[in-house]
Amino acid sequence: MEKLNIGIILGSTREGRLSPQVGEWVERIANERGDANYQIVDIADYKLPLLGEADATEQATAWNAKLAELDGFVFIVQEYNHSISASLKNALDYAREAWNNKAAGIVSYGSVGGARAAEHLRGILGELSVADVRVHPALSLFTDFENGATFKPADLHLVNLNGMLDQVLAWSGALKTLRV
């Protein structure tokens, strides 16, 4: 059976963001498993304007084409004011069918592990027909980031990360049969 393609979605575009460090950690651990094709997908690369404010045909086409290549997702989500970033919500809204019948895991971070942002994202994913998995690594800005800037995750997160990846792969494989 051909390996699944899983996108690691960086959920922030702001200057000085921490999501690339977290995404690279997820990608490194995931690639060590060798069970799927994992790749970082940075929403900042697509330069999506606010939905409806400008002609974004070219950006939206590229964004949807990238999502269509993927069988599942791992969202790197940081908490902004008890929710997800505006840039992630905007990117989610720029696609519809490209999200449908796929699975997603969430790796979140924030002062309370990004739990509130993860919960908001789950509701949005449900509306997009994305099956979010239960296991959820929640990283603390206080214990997993040195000086609030350098990502140094505690080893205990590996159990949840691998458990989440197991669930994302199982669900992504099952849901792929609906898209064939």
Image: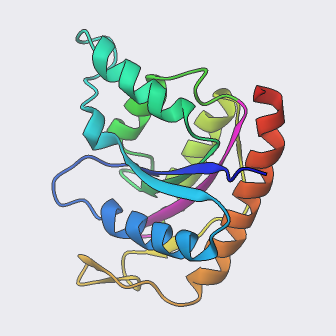
Magenta region includes residue 23: no
Q: Is residue 103 left or right of residue 39?
A: right
Q: Which quarter of the picture shows residue 21?
A: bottom left
Q: Main secondary structure of the magenta part?
A: strand
Residue closest to the eye, 24 or 83: 24
Left or right for 102, reference 116: right
Residue 147 image point, x, y percent: 23, 84
Residue occupying the far left of the picture: 15
Q: Give above or below for 125 relative to 111.
A: above
Q: Tell me what residue is drawn at x 34 percent, y 37 percent.
A: 86
Q: Quadrant of the C terminus?
A: top right
Pick whichever, 129 or 25, lies toward us: 25
Q: Is residue 126 left or right of residue 157?
A: right
Is the residue 147 above or below the residue 97 in the image? Answer: below
Provide residue 160's location: percent of width, then percent of height: 65, 75
**Residue 159, position as x, y percentages in the image:** 66, 82
Residue 7 as seen in the image, left or right of residue 90: right
Q: How many marks?
A: 0
Identify which residue is drawn at 37% across, 85% down.
152
Residue 101's quadrant in the figure? top right
Residue displayed at 50% across by 23% down: 95
Segment tinted magenta in the rendering: 101-112
Residue 171, how many percent across, how many down? 78, 49
